[in-house]
Amino acid sequence: TLATEIAGRTFDNCLMNAAGVRCQSIADLNKLIDSTAGAYVTKSATPVKRAGNPSPRMHTLPKGSINSMGLPNEGLDYYLDFVLQDQANRPGTTNFLSVAGTSLEDNLSMLHQIQDSAYTGFVELNLSCPNVPGHPQVGYDFDRVKTVLTAVFDFYTKPLGVKLPPYFDLVHFDQIADILNQFPLTFVNSINSIGNGLVIDPHAEKVVIKPKGGFGGIGGAFVKPTALANVRGLALRLKPEIAIVGTGGILNGQDVFEHILCGASMVQIGTQFGYEGTQIFDRISQELTAIMAAKGYTSINDFKGKLKTF
Ligand code: DHB
């Protein structure tokens, strides 16, 4: 079985989509509900609908993707209405509502609205969007992370996790974990895209996306070693009550296996889900099941976090 559990909520499959990819519309979200994914996460919401950055704003390559979408989304009411309706239709299921205010005030107003609603699922507070010009990634400003979480947990009492950017220095792992451990977080999701990479077309001698002079968040196969380092680095440092959702560079069952070895309880798939659509959850489920069967594992708990070192 590929079932997993986070904070007492059970999921029949540890695979799900990553926020941003094929989850902006109700049609997209209904396809996820009808898939074998164990849960879905909604496109990161802002208080009001946004059109996002000008196109072209995403480009895919064999080894990954670059995007600078700029938070196009339908606004919080659209996603909150959807998850409330789904919660009523399918009691006992848990999903992820992603929020990504471009200011602390926007995040707090959205979280107040969610707190005051009947929603009982998870919130994924995105502290790592790299693509809104003039708004730095909160996750790289440690004092700011503490300020935001202090303000959030002053009133928010439902299950909440944070989506983090990738870190590249072990001292930064220590510093972010020390802050996160001070709060009653349900999970952390690591990693968001590697921010502000640059992909160019040498033939045209030109960048491939329009916003920000061509700079954008990198996802896909390129980012797996960084994602595994962040999942592992956080698993070794966070208190055990904080579950880890692993995201980054998942193309197949082996990649999922590696994320779980590093400590992920659930994994999210972005770039490759964009290529393949919801069929990917069937394919990767079969691949992971085969790896587990060959090793004699019957549950992801048999190997979760059990990476060996010399
Ligand atoms: C966008 C990109 C992100 O990586 C993210 O976390 C949120 C939003 C975007 O450009 O829309």
Image: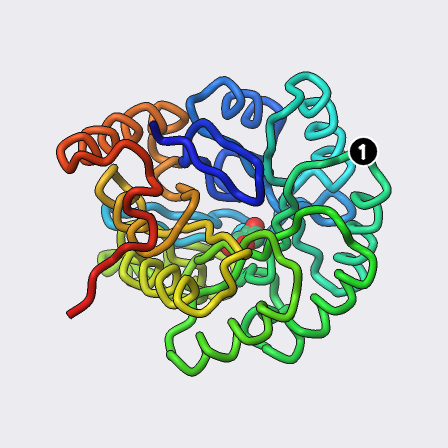
Q: Amino acid at mark 1?
A: Ala
Residue 187 place in picture, x, y as percent: 55, 53
Q: Quadrant of the N terminus?
A: top left
* 223 versus 280 height, above or below: below
Residue beneath the point at 74% across and 69% down = 150
Q: How many marks?
A: 1
Residue 78 place in picture, x, y as percent: 74, 33
**Residue found at the very far bottom of the displayed protein:** 171
* 49 versus 193 height, above or below: above
Is the residue indicated by label 1 positioned so its CB lies within 8 Å of ligand 1?
A: no
Q: Is residue 45 left or right of residue 263?
A: right
Q: Quadrant of the C terminus?
A: bottom left
| Label 1: how many Cα within 10 Å (few below 14, some 14–19, many 20+) | few
Residue 109 place in picture, x, y as percent: 83, 54
Residue 253 place in picture, x, y as percent: 25, 37
Q: In what element is the residue under mark 1?
A: loop
What's the colour scheme?
Answer: rainbow
Q: Which residue is mark 1?
A: 118
Residue beneath the point at 41% across and 25% down = 278
- In front here: 1 or 152? 1
Residue beneath the point at 69% across and 25% down = 87
- In front here: 120 or 250? 120
* 53 versus 82 height, above or below: below
Residue beneath the point at 28% across and 46% down = 303
Q: Is residue 246 left or right of residue 288?
A: right
**Residue found at the very far right of the displayed protein:** 116
Q: Quadrant of residue 277?
A: top left
